[in-house]
Amino acid sequence: MKILILGGDGYLGWPTAMHFASRGDEVTVVDNYLRRNIARETRSEALMQNPNLHTRCDVFEEATGNQIDVRIGDCADYRTLYTIVDKVKPDTIIHYAEQPSAPYSMKGYDEAVLTFNNNLTSTFNLIWAVIQCVPQCHIIKLGTMGEYGTPNIDIEEGWLDVEHKGRKQKFLYPRQAGSLYHTTKVLDTDLLWFYVRTHDLKVTDLMQGPVYGLSTEQSLLDDRLLPNFHYDDIFGTVVNRFLVQAISGVPLTIYGKGGQTRGYLNLRDTLQCVQLAADSAPEKGELRIFNQFTEQFSVNEIAERVKRAGKLLDLTVELRSIPNPRKELENHYYNPSHHGLLDLGLEPHYMTDDVLAEMLETISRFKHAIDPEMISPRVRWS
């Protein structure tokens, strides 16, 4: 396939690009380094120093013999994105080109408006570029399980059958996001659903849980191919953050009571899920939604798992509850369905002690670069 990846420099975008290129697909990546720039501005740089996209692709080609085409450009600029889509004529477009941090989106007005404009404009521009250039193209958009919030009923896979006063209809499952970032993802879904209905687009929306991990089959070839591994309070997911805290001797910072429960998945399973979606496109006029995670844990359960894995490496890992900087339920019901990708053949990598210990060993090689001041929460929801 010809695959265009928007946001190809990101934590997920770069491994996705290597994954598809390694199996022989024609891959083009687009990025404007927005996430890198924000990370520098907020003192939230990745643990490893990642080369720029052109250098990464040169290293990747030298290690594997496979090529990835690079376009530096802003997907929120329509003429830029239109030109790239019209030139590449992709079969599949994978859309990661959004400001990905909930804390950043809640930092203040400037951060909120950047998140709002970038995320919605990028999605809107993508839709119109597909309509005008490649109407048969399959759009794969990365959503988030955070769109659903934590309702007191089971979370279905994207859709809900509603019966009201004797009549029935299927609707998008109600969303109640907990941050502005997650709200932009809700609006993404609404935009896509509107244009699927009006222009018969083919769209897969992946409602992904928090991802952990820092190695893939390709990144093992050279440290310069590692993903952008963040451990700070703004871009770092809770598992990655806890692992770095364990290595640096900083007590694991549990927000509030620690009962917040979410669905998690290994970075390698993100690659599996996106491939499964790409290899089985929906029909024209179909918005297909998958809940993309493999296991669910509370924050307390993750902390205990990291502590247990630390013992395998003779690490003394302490836990510390701190006031929750976010507005969220700390004890709640959480039961989301997630059978769609399993039905397509997903073979999960589970969060075992050995998996966490292996990550700890890799992180320990970069211990000298850890800045403990980047870990404690610097953004409050109100």
Image (spheres, rainbow, N blue to C red):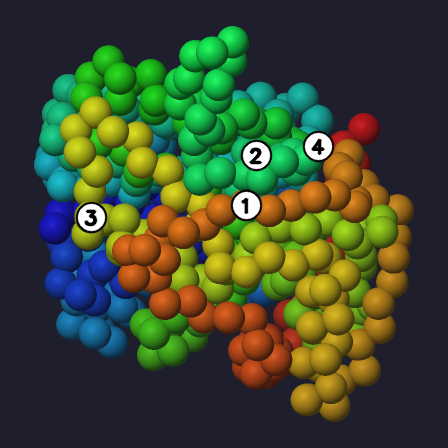
- Tag 3, which secondary structure? loop
Q: CA distance from mark 2 to mark 4?
A: 22 Å
Between residue 14 and residue 355, name the one nearer to us.
Answer: 355
Q: Residues within 10 Å of mark 2 (few under 14, many from 20)?
A: many
- Tag 4, which secondary structure? loop
Q: CA distance from mark 4 to mark 3?
A: 39 Å
Left or right? Give the position of 199 relative to 378: left
Residue type at tag 3: Ser
Give percent across and percent down for residue 84: 19, 34
Q: Is residue 26 visible?
A: yes
Disc 1 vs disc 2: Cβ atoms closer than 8 Å?
Answer: yes
Q: Which residue was labeled with disc 1?
A: 336
Question: On the image, which quarter does residue 72 sit in?
Answer: top left
Q: Residue furthest top?
A: 165
Of label 2 and label 4, which has the lower sequence position? Answer: 4
Dot in front, 4 or 1: 1
Q: CA distance from mark 2 to mark 3?
A: 25 Å
Left or right? Give the position of 247 relative to 324: left
Left or right? Give the position of 156 relative to 1: right
Q: CA distance from mark 3 to mark 1?
A: 23 Å
Residue found 45% across the figure and 45% down from its top: 291
Q: Which residue was labeled with disc 4?
A: 107
Q: CA distance from mark 1 to mark 2?
A: 9 Å
Dot in front, 3 or 1: 1
Residue found 36% across the figure and 49% down from its top: 340
